[in-house]
Image (cartoon, coloured by chain):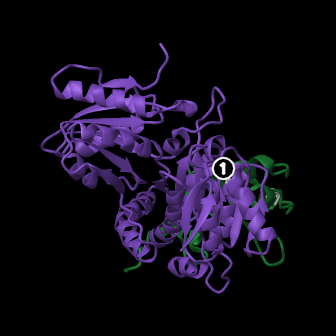
Amino acid sequence: MKEDKYFAGIIKKPGSSMTYKTYVWRDGLKPAWIKKNCINCLTCYINCPDHAIKVDKDGNMAGHNLDYCKGCGICAQVCPAKPKAIEMKKE
Amino acid sequence: MKRLALTGNEAMAYAMKQSKPDVFCGYPITPTTDILVTLAKYIANGELDCEFVTAESEHSVASILYGASSAGARCFTCTASQGLALMHEVLHIISGARLPIIIGSSSRSLSSPINVHGDHADFMDMRDTSFIQIFSENAQDSYDNFLQGVRIAEEARLPAIISSDGFITSHNLEAVEVLKDEIAYKFIGDYKTPFSILDIKNPITINPLSLPNSFMEIKKSQADAMRQAKKVIPKVALEYEKISGRQYGFFREYCLDDAKVAIVVLGSTAETAQLVIDELRNKGIKAGILALRVFRPFPAKEIMAALSNCKVVCILDRADAYSSLGGPLFVEVASALYKSKSRPILLSRIYGLGGREIDEEMIKNIFEEIIKINKGQKLNEFGYIGLKK
Ligand code: SF4
Ligand code: SF4
């Protein structure tokens, strides 16, 4: 019998969700990082529901991964820096 | 072949034992508890080597089996009525994930009001869950159907429920011919899973998120499996006949060849009706029975062919669909007959709800009605049998 590629929706390739760029869900707003205000607390990293905050190998905030950012605005909301280090901007 | 005195439940448990499940998970519920108890005894006696998991609810039973089956285990359970209804959410997930888990059941009414007796409400309630659904007329059927059900489910890669009438079949002691263990297991064979979530060399994702760009194709593939199951069922029946000498089809016909009037019925009532047919035939009345065995996949074409010579057919439902369109079996048989050239007159009669008695006298009355209609008298299309005034 020929293999049914739709069988139970099983995915055989690991990591395939990487190919699905969820930024298409964004609705007009995207976050912008203002590096000079950032105190590097990583509150945004902990709170982002889409793992779209980049952290470099030394553990420092390194901006947004806009391929997977859905533009929810949580990171901007929770950022404790004064003035804020993340702002939501029109696309 | 050995003959044993077994209840319907015990016959099913015997078939389960011979099929050597890896995992049995259950939660007791009337009238299927005996299946679970009998299986537990087999394990305690050392007659069966199987992981026996007790869960805190039927929802958990189905979820545990979902996990075990995903890992590649042959999985059975038993349940009915509220228990089966509580599993409902997970039943769709099991069938969507194409896991051939098999439920042994004895059908019972659904609350409210609460009633523990037999009718087919629970069986009909799951008719869109994509389970293969097979019904038994007696304890022998319960045994034979369960063994065949394992083969059918595993080959079609769909789950199955094998049911019988609660109490009437599940609790009555009957003479049941059982196969030798080796012969039964040779027929069943080892379970070969096409995947296992524990196979770390071949990692896979099961039950993934599927958005509008893939969902429909996956569901169509599932529907194809049910169409494919229609081919598997007669093939398995033929193999089973070779080892048991007993014949099974999508349904059993009794005096249907030349019948002008007939009833369609599911379960033990077919045997009661048979006695009435003998009497009617002696009087020269051409009456017959179509005793349905396989409800899913629904054998529409075959039913149409079998009933095409009838003038009037009464479909007996031991459940209501509350649709104002007649019983659930009636609606499906009517759909099956839409393409028939001869289009028999169809009647829907609901009977036996919550274990209400159905006897020969009542079935005789139905045939009297059918015969009147055949002679041109107008009668209600929808109605009940044995309803108090
Ligand atoms: S806007 Fe939302 S999704 Fe995007 S980076 Fe911020 S928290 Fe994450
Ligand atoms: S929450 Fe604000 S301050 Fe903290 S790391 Fe993120 S951007 Fe920088």
| B94 or B302: nearer the viewer | B302
| Chain depicted in purple | B
Please, which chain is the residue tagged with disc 1 on?
B
Report the residue marked by disc 1: B32
| Chain depicted in green | A
Tell me the quarter of the picture where residue B181 sits: bottom right
Q: Is residue A21 visible?
A: no
Residue B138 in the image: above or below residue B195? above
Q: Is residue B119 left or right of residue B5?
A: left
| A76 or A84: nearer the viewer | A76
Q: What residue type is disc 1 on?
A: Thr
Q: Is residue B53 left or right of residue B242?
A: right
Which residue is pictured at 29% across the width and 25% down the height?
B381
- Residue B234 point in image, percent of width and height: 36, 67
- Residue B345 point in image, percent of width and height: 21, 33
At label 1, counting other C-alpha atoms closer than 10 Å, the crowd grade (few under 14, some 14-19, many 20 or more) is many
Q: Is residue B242 visible?
A: yes
Quarter of the N terminus of chain A within the rendering? bottom left
| B122 or B68: nearer the viewer | B122
Residue B385 in the image: above or below residue A35? above
- Residue B335 point in image, percent of width and height: 28, 42
| B242 or A44: nearer the viewer | B242
Q: Quadrant of ligand 2?
A: bottom right
